[in-house]
Image: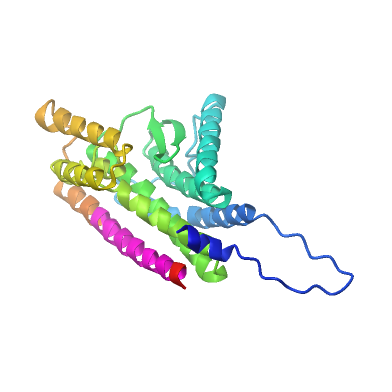
Amino acid sequence: MQSAVSESDKDISVEEPSGQQPAPRKPRFLKVAAGILIATGLLALKLKGLLFFGLAKFKPLMVNPLEGFGLAQFAWTAGSMAVTIGAYAFKFGLAFAIGFVLLTVIHELGHALLIRAKGLRASAMVFIPFIGGAVTLKDQPRSAFDDAQIGLAGPIAGTVASLLCLFIYRLNGDSLYLVLAFAGFALNLLNLMPVGPLDGGRIAAAISKWMWVLGSGILVYMLVVWRNPLLLPVLFLGLYQIYRTIIGDYDELFYAVTISQRSRIAAFYFALVFFLGYETLTVHAELLTLQTS
């Protein structure tokens, strides 16, 4: 991955006419930020049809996803974002760090937008290095169906943002955008794993709670193969949710989902998993080709 990025960083020497100074080059991370921000604007125009599927009553998009955020919330969001960018920049470089965090912001804004459209309140948006981001809720969803829609909104927004990165790469050939597209596809796919604290766990609750058992088994396998300690908290929280909702207390009213609602959520979920899996494998193969060329 790193060699693919470094290839695009090679300077192409161009002889300048005598007496003329070469034009100053814009820092690369600014180009990346500008590209992602333009993509975000295009994404905002397309979110209506993607995010508001299945709502009993369509609500206008004229909602502020950050409504209710005060100075403390914005300071917490900005601070955690800066720390996350710094952590990623130390390991992967500033350009990738800014682009990747912007992709995470778009993902979380997808959640926040649908939260507000549901008439609920979000309390803060936080970012954690090498884990991701989260939008915390002041109000809890009224049903598993509402919670599943909110859970789907983030990966849908993140998928569209990753596609826009791939589109920018097709236009300018800068392999950094291909790396960002791969990271976006892969992490949105991972986030759809049906385990409690992940978006996939929230979505699975409206399909079948027994999917949590399958997701926990997959996570145990990944933990054994990858030996990544960051997966342990996710596994423990997932196992606790299984105990609390399947073995322990069971809120029948919250999990009362109609067959129609269950079918719609399942259709969107499995279609998104299939699409992200395909794009992740395809873009990864293209990155390997760039590395060996």
Instruction: For residue 290, say whether it is visible.
Output: yes
Q: Position of residue 250 (x, y in %)?
A: 13, 29
Magenta segment main secondary structure? helix
Report whether 30 appears left or right of 18: left
Residue, x 20% and y 41% (percent of image)? 205
Residue furthest to the right? 19
Q: Position of residue 217 (x, y in %)?
A: 16, 44
Q: Quadrant of residue 245?
A: top left
Which residue occupies 84% across, 75% down?
17
Q: Is residue 251 in view from this perspective? A: no
Q: Residue furthest left?
A: 247
* Nearer the observer, 271 or 261: 271
Q: Residue at x 43, y 53 (%)?
A: 47
Frontmost residue, 220 versus 35: 220
The front one of 51 and 129 is 129
**Rendered position, 248 above or below 260:** above
Question: Which residues fall within the magenta stretch?
Answer: 268-290
Residue 142, horizontal then vertical, whole percent: 27, 33
Scheme of image coloration: rainbow
Please report the residue visible at 37 percent of the width from the left and 50 percent of the height from the top.
Answer: 187
Position of 71 with respect to 112 (left or right) is right
Indicate whether 116 appears above or below 99. Answer: above
Query: Can residue 274 be found in the magenta stretch?
Result: yes
